[in-house]
Amino acid sequence: MKIGAHVSIAGNLLNAVAKAKDIGASCIQIFSSPPQSWTGPKFSEETLSNFRDALRKESISPVFVHDLYLINLASDNSFLRKSSITALKEDLNFASAIGARGVIFHLGSHPLGWSGLKREELMDSFKRVLENIPESVSLLIENVAGGGTKLGSTFAQLGEMKNDVNDPRLGFCIDTAHTFESGYDMRTKENVDDMVDLLHQTVGMENVLTIHCNDSKTDLGSHNDRHENIGEGKIGIEGFRTLVNHRLMKDKPFILETPGFDSKGPDAKNVEILKSLIT
């Protein structure tokens, strides 16, 4: 099993590789640019080549890119929608350039939800994002904790998106904290088995390309997105023990986005805790 973490590229793209090595991560997730702006990735071909070489040298794979927090494909604001499409296309091309597996993003929100005219508009947005994008990279919708008008908090809705878009490059990233916070219990073996079975029935585990592995600081069904270190939150160790050993999960890369025991982000202790649960 591959266990990794979200790591910073601050200062230099290669810093992500050094951080991964330092905490014992065998796979990583990065931002290509500051997630609170529309600047987009700006790296020279030499930098990209050096990054690919460093990843190969340290046997770090797969790599995922997390897109901007600003993205909302469901927005009625034409500027925001167009900017979201452009940002996703830029990151998909960046992902291809560094040999990443895919780009993870949050779909956005809209009062009408996933229905009617808005659903048709969203399908058009997906088609525009994936147009002329390399076949080697996937666009991964991340499930959310829900609340308000956010889209993508239920497995049933994710399954509808997969069927509607009907493109093999569309996949999913399942966040354990978001899953729990949106109402799917994961605290016991029976809970986890039921959750994974439902996910397989609605989305298909073959379409889940990675797991964001985070404990939850908030309660089951809280719809409040707050990550916690593994075993320190409301899900607890037993839930994660079952998850990492589940037959349909054992081949998935697990990416930590925990706050860290030193409050500096995913750390070696979280990586080691997760590794210790594998039997």
Image (cartoon, rainbow, N blue to C red):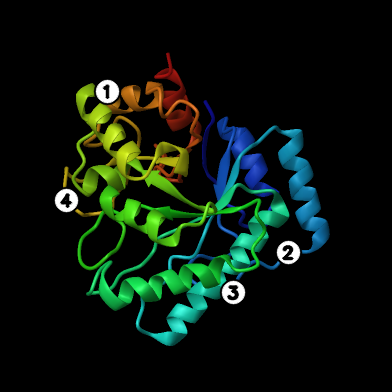
Mark 1, Cα crowd under 10 Å, few <14 / some 14-19 / many 20+, is some
Q: CA distance from mark 4 to mark 3?
A: 33 Å
Q: Find out whether the residues at labels 2 and 4 contact each other: C-beta distance under 8 Å.
A: no
**SS at badge 4:** loop
Residue 185 position in % (x across, y down): 19, 36
Residue in the image at 23% along x and 68% along y: 149
The mark nearer the N terminus, 3 or 1, is: 3
Is residue 128 something one can see in this rendering? Answer: yes
Q: Is residue 277 above or below residue 138?
A: above
Residue behind mark 4: 222
Q: CA distance from mark 2 to mark 4?
A: 40 Å
Residue in the image at 46% along x and 38% along y: 206
Q: CA distance from mark 4 to mark 1?
A: 20 Å
Side (left or right) of 148 relative to 63: left
**SS at badge 2:** loop
Residue 43, labelled with which disc?
2
Side (left or right) of 117 relative to 99: left
In the figure, residue 219 lies in which quadrant? top left
Residue 238, labelled with which disc?
1
Residue behind mark 3: 39
In the figure, residue 89 lies in which quadrant? bottom right
Q: Amino acid at mark 4?
A: Ser
